[in-house]
Image: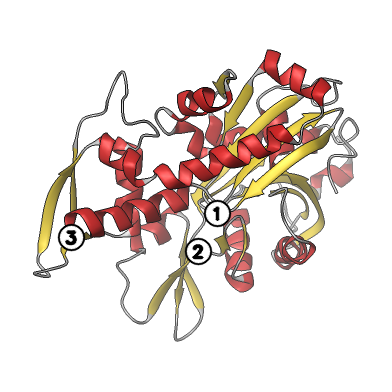
């Protein structure tokens, strides 16, 4: 090990709308919700990650909770910097008398603009990075699930995160055809909140909607192994009194149907723009699902019915992008053209 490596810390970051995952030394060292709690009067950071999420929706006027990312990109520059600084501090700094120089690889949506890309770079640099490289999420996801992206074979990746859904056809180490839409898990939560207001006259919060999505969320109205019905607590819109209702998976499937239809259309659009030789490869290899949205019950079957292709859910889909980012960082010489 060279002396320089003691003073350089290489970290791979999946800077997600819902969760931020940091890989260091081939393992996940940080896996926290992308949220910061800030004191309004002093602008001081009170909590980040899980502790800040526990405060979300329960704060008084002197504390605000901020989600720095929206639709996969940085919406609040300062909060993003605070969050990154705090999460980097969570990484152990043993054997280091001096603050190490940070080399970061951060994954970004494939449909990001130059201004949004610059915001990611600036936030990372303000948080202490000496060198920042970027990699597109679908490419990182493909590497993370074990696909050899350098081969002349077409593979289709669908990465459904909190803020965006990334659909890409990858071959020869590049993205041949892609579609990035700003629809993801957060939109499912909004759909559930709206459905509860319209159908049950009950007002629920964002965290409750997320819990309902995890416990009974479904992309299909008929499942082979349906989950049990769940109680949902909120405020009655007519009386203002707290209220409990029982919800089943069929209702949630109806609530999020429009958002899933948008993802289906984006997948079909990406397939339409795929060269015929690569289309033939995808017919053989099928479609790979990654991201938190891949865990939605019945989504693989619904996409399979729509595209008439095999749909495979990746192992540990939540960490596929972060894992791929870490592999790209480790094999810098093998993937030099993947990282900007």
Under circle 1, the secondary element is: loop
Disc 2 and disc 1 in contact, CB within 8 angstroms: yes
Q: Is residue 37 visible?
A: yes
Residue linked to disc 2: 67
Where does the image place residue 315, in percent across and percent down from the top left? 55, 23
- Check the image and report above or below for 72 versus 235: above
Under circle 3, the secondary element is: loop
Residue at x 62% of width, y 34% of height? 158
Of circles 1 and 3, the one toward us is 3
Where does the image place residue 154, in percent across and percent down from the top left? 78, 23
Q: CA distance from mark 3 to mark 2?
A: 27 Å
Q: CA distance from mark 1 to mark 3?
A: 29 Å
Where does the image place residue 224, in percent across and percent down from the top left? 31, 18
Under circle 2, the secondary element is: loop
Residue 17 numbered tag: 1
Q: How many marks?
A: 3
- Mark 1 vs 3, N-terminal side: 1
Give whichever of 140, 332 is nearer the camera. 140
- Rendered image quadrant of residue 223: top left
- Rendered image quadrant of residue 282: top right
Of circles 3 and 2, the one toward us is 3
Residue linked to disc 3: 201
């Amino acid at each position: 090990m060279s002396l320089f490596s003691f003073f350089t810390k290489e970290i791979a970051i999946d800077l997600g709308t819902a969760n931020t995952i940091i890989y260091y030394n081939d393992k996940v060292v940080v896996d926290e919700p992308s949220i910061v709690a800030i004191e309004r009067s002093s602008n001081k950071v009170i909590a980040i990650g899980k502790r800040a999420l526990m405060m979300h929706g329960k704060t008084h006027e002197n504390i605000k909770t901020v989600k720095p990312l929206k639709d996969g990109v940085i919406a609040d520059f300062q909060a993003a910097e605070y969050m990154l600084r705090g999460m980097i501090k969570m990484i152990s700094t043993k054997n280091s008398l001096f603050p190490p120089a940070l080399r970061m690889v951060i994954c970004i949506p494939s449909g990001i603009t130059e201004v949004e890309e610059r915001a990611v770079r600036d936030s990372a640099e303000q948080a202490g990075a000496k060198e920042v490289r970027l990699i597109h999420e679908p490419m990182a996801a493909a590497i993370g699930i074990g696909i050899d992206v350098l081969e002349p074979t077409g593979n289709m990746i669908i990465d459904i995160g909190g803020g965006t859904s990334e659909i890409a056809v990858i071959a020869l180490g590049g993205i041949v055809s892609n579609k990035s839409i700003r629809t993801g898990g957060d939109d499912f939560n909004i759909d559930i909140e709206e459905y509860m207001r319209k159908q049950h006259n009950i007002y629920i919060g964002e965290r409750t909607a997320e819990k309902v999505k995890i416990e009974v969320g479904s992309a299909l109205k008929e499942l082979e192994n349906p989950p049990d019905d769940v109680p949902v607590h909120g405020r009655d819109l007519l009386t203002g009194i707290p209220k409990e209702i029982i919800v089943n998976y069929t209702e949630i499937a109806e609530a999020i149907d429009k958002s899933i239809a948008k993802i289906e259309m984006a997948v079909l659009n990406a397939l339409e723009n795929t060269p015929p030789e690569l289309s033939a490869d995808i017919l053989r290899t099928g479609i790979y699902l990654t991201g938190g949205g891949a865990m939605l019950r019945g989504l693989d079957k619904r996409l399979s019915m729509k595209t008439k292709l095999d749909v495979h859910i990746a192992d540990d889909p939540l960490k596929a992008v972060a894992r791929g980012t870490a592999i790209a960082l480790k094999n810098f010489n093998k993937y030099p053209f993947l990282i900007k």
